[in-house]
Image (tube, rainbow, N blue to C red):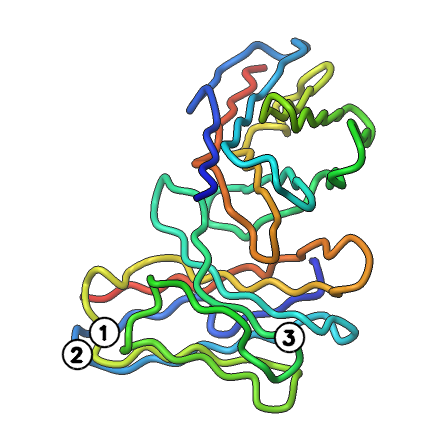
C-alpha cells in the first residue's frame, strides 16, 4: 500500500453514461497526477495539479473529461458520455514537488464501457 | 517529443539467472528516471529513482543505471526469483512521467 487510494476499484458502465472517479493522495503531497493505461501499454499522462491549480492537460483529455482538485487534497476525474474507447485503467499518483518529486501510485480504477 | 522504448517486450528466464532490462529515451533533458513494477491488474510500485545527476541506484537485488549521453537506462536483477515475475516499466520525469511500454518478465521455478 503506497498511501494513495482510489475509488471505485472497478466500474462497469453503459456507453453514454457519465462516471466519476476519486483519488486521495498521500496527505503531505502537493502534486496529484492522473494517467490512463490500456492493456499491454505503459500509462499515458492525462493531467496534473499542484495544490488546487491544474498545471497541465494532455491532448488525450478531450472535452468529455474533466478533473478537479477543489481544496488541494482529493481529486475527481469525470468522464461524460462514455465511449467504448474509454475502457482502461485510470491511475492516480501523488508527489511532493520539492526534492526528488518521486511519484507514488494508487491501485487504479478499472473502467469497462459496454 | 520524448519517446521511451523498452526492450525486450517480454522475457522468460529460469530461476536464479541474472538479467538486464533496457530502457532508451530520445531527449536527455530529463529530471529523474524511475523504474516501476506492475503486477497484473494492479497499480505501479516504485522500485528505484535515479536523479539526473546520478549514474546509478541500488536496492537489494536491483541495480539501475542511467547514461544520459547515450539515452539509456538499465535495470539489473540479480539471482532472479519467481516472485520477480511482473511487468517492469521505466519512466522519464519532466514534471509528468513518460513511460515505456514495459517488459513482461517471467521467472520459471
Foreground disc of the pair 3, 1: 3
For marks 1 and 2 on the same chain, the one whose residue lies earlier in the sequence: 2
- Residue A82 is marked as 1
Q: Name the image quarter holding residue B33.
A: top right
**Residue at mark 3 shares a chain with residue at mark 2:** yes
Point out residue B87 in the picture as x, y percentages from the top left corner. 51, 34
Task: Tell me if mark 1 has few (under 14), some (14-19) or many (20+) residues whose alpha carbon lies within 10 angstroms of its own.
Answer: many
Q: Quadrant of residue A72?
A: bottom right
Rounded to the nearest whole Å, what is the CA distance between mark 1 and mark 2?
A: 5 Å
Q: Are marks 3 and 1 on the same chain?
A: yes
User: In the image, residue B24 lies at what x, y percent?
Assistant: 53, 27
Real-space CA distance between mark 3 and mark 2, rounded to the nearest whole angstrom: 31 Å
What residue would you read off at disc 3? A50
Along the line of sight, the residue nearer the viewer: B55 or B104 = B55
Q: Which mark is residue A16?
A: 2
Q: Which mark is residue B51?
A: none
Nearer the N terminus, badge 3 or badge 1? 3
Tell me, yes or no, whether the two marked residues, 1 and 2, touch with CB atoms within 8 Å: yes
Residue A19: image location, x then y, percent? 33, 80
Task: For the residues labelled 3 and 1, say whether their Cβ atoms are less than 8 Å apart.
Answer: no
**Chain holding disc 3:** A
Question: Does residue A100 lie above or below B19 as drawn?
Answer: below
Q: Is residue B59 above or below residue A87?
A: above
Quote the CA–CA distance across marks 3 and 1. 27 Å
Q: Residues within 10 Å of mark 3 (few under 14, many from 20)?
A: many
Determine the image quadrant of residue A13: bottom left
User: Residue at image x 71%, y 74%?
Assistant: A30
Q: Front-most of B18 and B58?
A: B58
Q: From the top left corner, tell me how far across and down residue B75 is, in percent.
A: 66, 24
Amino acid at each position: 500500500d503506497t498511501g494513495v487510494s482510489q475509488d471505485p476499484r472497478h466500474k462497469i458502465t453503459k456507453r453514454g453514461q457519465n462516471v466519476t472517479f476519486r483519488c486521495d493522495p498521500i496527505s503531505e503531497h502537493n502534486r496529484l497526477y492522473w494517467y490512463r493505461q490500456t492493456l499491454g501499454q505503459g500509462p499515458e499522462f492525462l493531467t496534473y495539479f499542484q495544490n488546487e491549480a491544474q498545471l497541465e492537460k494532455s491532448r488525450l483529455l478531450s472535452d468529455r473529461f474533466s478533473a478537479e482538485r477543489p481544496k488541494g487534497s482529493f481529486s475527481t476525474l469525470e468522464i461524460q458520455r462514455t465511449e467504448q474507447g474509454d475502457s482502461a485503467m485510470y491511475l492516480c499518483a501523488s508527489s511532493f514537488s520539492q526534492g526528488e518529486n518521486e511519484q507514488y501510485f494508487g491501485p487504479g480504477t478499472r473502467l469497462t464501457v459496454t | 517529443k520524448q519517446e521511451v522504448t523498452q526492450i525486450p517486450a517480454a522475457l522468460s528466464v529460469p530461476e536464479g539467472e541474472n538479467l538486464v532490462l533496457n530502457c532508451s529515451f530520445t531527449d536527455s533533458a530529463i529530471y529523474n528516471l524511475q523504474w516501476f513494477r506492475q503486477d497484473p491488474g494492479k497499480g505501479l510500485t516504485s522500485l528505484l529513482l535515479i536523479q539526473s545527476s546520478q549514474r546509478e541506484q541500488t536496492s537489494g537485488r536491483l541495480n539501475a543505471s542511467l547514461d544520459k549521453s547515450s539515452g539509456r537506462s538499465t535495470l539489473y536483477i540479480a539471482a532472479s526469483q519467481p516472485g520477480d515475475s511482473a511487468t517492469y516499466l521505466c519512466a522519464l520525469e519532466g514534471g509528468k512521467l513518460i513511460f515505456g511500454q514495459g517488459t513482461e518478465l517471467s521467472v520459471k521455478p
